[in-house]
Amino acid sequence: MANDYQKDEEILGKAYDSKLMKRLLKYVKPYRKYIIIAIIMNIAVAVLGPIRPYLTKIAVDNDIANSDYHGLLIISLLLLAILLFQSVIQYFLTYFMQYLGQKIIYDLRSQLFTHIQKLSLKFFDKTPIGRLVTRVTNDIESLNALFSSGIVMVFSDIFKIIWILVFMFFLDVKLSLVTLSVLPFLIYGTFLFRRKVRESYRDVRLYLARLNSYMQEHITGMNVVQIFNKEKSELNKFSSINNDYKKANIKSIFYYAVFFPSVELISSVAIGLIIWYGGGKVISSTVTIGTLFAFIQFAEMFFRPIRDLSEKYNILQTAMASSERIFKLLDNKTFIKNPDKYTELNFLKGKITFKDVCFEYKKDEPVLKNINFNINPGESVAIVGATGAGKTSIINLLTRFYDINSGSILVDDIDIRKLNKRELRKHISIVLQDVFLFSGTISTNISMDNSEITDEQIKKAAALVGADKFIEALPNKFNEMVMERGSTLSVGQKQLISFARALAYNPQILILDEATSSVDTETEALIQKAIERLLTGRTAIVIAHRLSTIQKANKIIVMHKGEIRETGNHQELLTKKGIYYKLYQLQYKDQEITKSA
C-alpha cells in the first residue's frame, strides 16, 4: 500500500498535457469574461512597459541634447503618469487574478470533496487517508498557482517580449541583433535548467511521499511506539528519510541558484555588447546616445520575462502532475449507484429479509455464503459468531455500504437496490464499537448538525441512554467542546454519546455492532435498560460477543465461516448444544474464573 502511495505521488506528468489542460479549462469557463478582462489588462501592462525606454530616448535626444527644459518636464511627467497608470493596472490585475484563482479552486475543491463523500467504503479500504488529504490540500493548491499566476500571466510575459522586440527593431535592427546574439546561450541554459529541475523535482516528490507516509503511520500509532520504547529507533528512521528529502531540496535549490545568476550574467553580457557596439556607433555618430540608453533599458526588460517564463514552466509542470492525480481520483467510479428510477420509501415498518445472499470483498474469497433469514417488524435479532464469521458484513450490506454479489436483501419486501441510498439510511441508525466523534460540541455530535433535530430531542436522547448524567456535570454541559476523535472523553462516555446520536434520529431500524463491548458493567447495565425501552416498535439487530447482553433477543443467528449454522432463541440454542452452547459455556467459564480470582 505504501509503495502504491509513493508511485502515485511520483507522477510527474508532461510539462504540458493538452487533455489535462482541456479538463482544467472547464473550471475556467464559468469565469471566461473575467479571463478576457485579465488578458486585456495584461496587454496594457505589456504595452506600457516598452514605452518608457522609448520616451527616455526622446528625452535624451530631443530635450537634453537641445536644453529644452519644458519638453524634458513634459516627458518626465508623462513617464510618471505611465508608471502610476501601470502600477494601478498591475494592482488590480494581481488582485483580480488571485481572486479568480481562489474562485476556481473553491469550485474544484468542493467538487473533489463531494466526489470523495460519494465513494463507497470499498475505495477507502484500499486508499490511505493521507493521500486523499494531499489531493484536497496540496494538489489543489498547486493548481491555484496555475490559475492565479500561471495561465494568464504567461500572456503578459509573451506580450512583453513581443513589444520589446518591436520597439528594438523599430529603433535599430543591427543593435537589436547584437542584443539578441546571446539568446542561444540563454535558450540552451533554460532547457538544461528545465531538465535538471524536472529530475530533482521527481526526487523531491518521492521523498516527500515517503515522509508523509511515515509521519501518518507513526503519529497514528504513537501509543504503540511509546509503549515499546521505540522513539529513538523511529527517530533514526525518520531522520534518514528527512535527510534524503533535505538533500533533494538542496539539489533543486542548487539549480535555481545557478540558473538565475546565469540569466543575470547573460543579461549583463548583452548590455556590455550594447555599450561596446552601440557606444562605437555613437562615437561615429550613426546612433544617437538616446537610442543607446533605450537599448540598455530594453535589454534589462527583455531578460526578465524570459526568466519569469522559466518559473511559469515549473508552475505548469507541478500543476500538470497535480491535476493528473486529482483527475485520477475524480475518475474513480467506485460508487454504490442509486437506481435511475427508485421506489419511494416514505414510511418503513422494519421488516428485513435476506435471500440467498453471497458476498466477497476480494474475488474468489467469499465472506458470506447463501445467507437466508427474516426479521419481522419490531423484532430484536442478535447475530453472534467468532471473529471473521461475517457478522459486520451483514450490516454493511443492509446499509448498502457494499453491494452483494448475488441474492437479494429486502426491506419491507422491497429490494434495497431499488431504493435511494439516502432514503434507506434515513431509517437506519448504527452504533459501532469504534466510536467516531467530530470536533465540535457534544450537542452537534449527537445531532450531526441536523437542523431538524431540536435541543429538546438531543437532551431527551441523551437522557434515555443515561448520557445526561456526565454531560450535565461538564462545565459547558451540552455545549462542551469535543476534541478531535473525542480524546478528552472516556471510552464509555463516547459510546453513550454515540447511542444518543443514533436515537436522536428516531430510526425504524437500530443496529448495535459490538456497541457495549467497550463500556464497564455499570454503564452496560444502564444502556441495556435504555435499549429495552427504546426497542419497542423498532426492529433491532444486535451484534455482540457478550452473550449475556442478547439473551432477551427474539431470535439469535449463529454464524460460522460466513454461513448461518444455528437459529433460535437463547434457550432453544442452549438445548441444541451446538456452536452457541459452546460459546456460552466458554464465556461462562471465563466469568467463573474472573469471579473466583
Image (cartoon, rainbow, N blue to C red):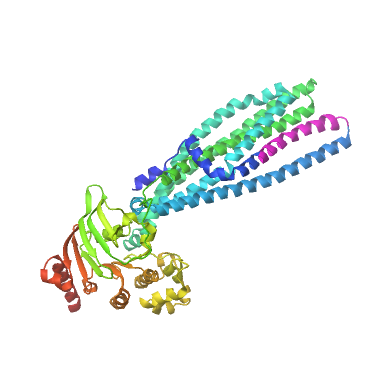
Magenta span covers which residues? 40-66
Q: Image quadrant of residue 348?
A: bottom left
Name the dominant secondary structure of the magenta segment.
helix
Q: Which quadrant would the C terminus be assigned to in this image? A: bottom left
| 381 relative position to 339: left or right | left
Q: Nearer the viewer, residue 350 or 25?
A: 350
Would you place residue 566 above or below residue 479 in this image?
above
Give the number of marks: 0
Q: Nearer the viewer, residue 168 or 23?
A: 23
Q: Nearer the viewer, residue 90 or 263?
A: 90
Q: Is residue 62 magenta?
A: yes
| 314 relative position to 595: left or right | right
Q: Image quadrant of residue 409?
A: bottom left
Q: Is residue 321 visible?
A: yes
| 423 relative position to 593: left or right | right
- Give me the residue at 40% from left, 78% from top: 468
